[in-house]
Image (cartoon, rainbow, N blue to C red):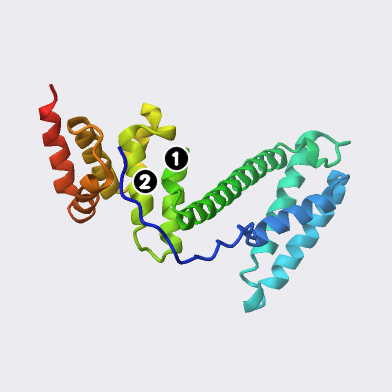
């Protein structure tokens, strides 16, 4: 079974490469890091002296309206207070070591996990952009139907639609519907077909369901005979889905 394809003759520009977003500045976070760097190797007495200075600066800032809401200053003061208490609990000969600070180590673990998640998102975005470029090239050659879908191609469909300014990519939708109906590519896995219900649009799902039933009823139907399925699913997806469900009653 096959489905109608639309040859693209107009070249679309390739997507811009994915750039890593810059992390917004966090004044409180900067303040805590500055305090920890300064405090490394300090004794309890040294930290107490630095805390006195921070309290003095806070009192001075409170006198000026433009400094009264100094987020970094408040964070530095709170951090000096925390480190002072930490060293007081650690004993008279203790010095501050960020490597032995449970709070610091917990923050570093969270940062590492967040960085790994951002890196994974960037890799996935780059993969989607590259796959979308591949789709565009295949469409220009009129050979999109010769490849099978892979895991994540539903997101590639969305990327192509975004590039087109929201216009439905009829050829890609038809290709995915055919693959889903015929269990091609990653749709050989029942779990992938089930997941597709949450990733593809109702017209694509209705088209796939209708194609599957028509292929069962009329094996070997050619492209021209099945063109109506795409039109019906696009204009009346609920009706196409209902028709597919009705046709299942004709199973032997």
Instruction: From the viewer's perspective, tell me whether residue 207 is left or right of residue 96.
Output: left
Question: Pointer 1: what residue?
Answer: 149
Q: Residue at x 13, y 41 (%)?
A: 243
Observer-nearest residue: 16 or 248? 248
Packing grade of label 2 (10 A; few <14, some 14-19, many >=20) is: many
Find numbered disc 2 in the image and state the secondary structure of the residue it sits on: helix
Residue 69: x and y in percent read 61, 69
Q: Is residue 64 above or below residue 106?
A: below
Q: Which of the 4 quarters of the picture holds residue 86?
A: top right
How far, Cα to Cα, is label 1 from label 2?
Answer: 9 Å
Mark 1 residue crowding within 10 angstroms, few (<14) / some (14–19) / many (20+) = some
Badge 1 vs badge 2, beta-carbon distance below 8 Å:
yes
Residue 76 showing in the rendered view: no
The circle drawn on residue 175 is 2
First reached walking from the N terminus: tag 1 or tag 2: 1
Q: Residue at x 53, y 49 (%)?
A: 131
Q: Nearer the viewer, residue 228 or 92?
A: 228
């Amino acid at each position: 079974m096959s489905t109608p394809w639309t040859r693209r003759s107009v070249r679309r520009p390739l997507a811009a490469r994915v750039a890593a977003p810059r992390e917004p500045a966090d004044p409180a976070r900067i303040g805590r890091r500055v305090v920890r760097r300064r405090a490394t190797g300090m004794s309890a007495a040294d930290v107490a002296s630095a805390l006195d200075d921070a309290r003095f600066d806070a009192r001075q800032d409170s006198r000026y309206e433009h400094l009264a809401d100094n987020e970094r200053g408040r964070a530095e003061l709170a951090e000096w207070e925390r480190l002072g208490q930490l060293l007081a609990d650690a004993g008279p000969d203790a010095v501050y070591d960020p490597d032995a600070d449970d709070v610091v180590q917990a923050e570093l673990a969270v940062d590492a996990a967040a960085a790994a998640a951002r890196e994974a998102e960037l890799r996935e975005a780059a993969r989607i952009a590259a796959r979308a470029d591949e789709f565009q090239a295949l469409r220009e050659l009129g050979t999109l139907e010769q490849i099978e879908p892979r895991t994540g191609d539903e997101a590639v469909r969305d990327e192509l639609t975004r590039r087109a300014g929201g216009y439905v990519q009829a050829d890609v939708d038809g290709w995915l519907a055919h693959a889903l109906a015929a269990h091609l590519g990653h749709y050989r896995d029942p779990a992938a077909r089930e997941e597709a219900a949450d990733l593809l649009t109702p017209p694509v799902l209705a088209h796939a369901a209708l194609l599957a039933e028509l292929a069962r009823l009329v094996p070997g139907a050619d492209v021209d005979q099945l063109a109506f399925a795409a039109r019906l699913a696009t204009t009346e997806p609920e009706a196409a889905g209902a028709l597919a469900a009705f046709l299942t009653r004709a199973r032997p």
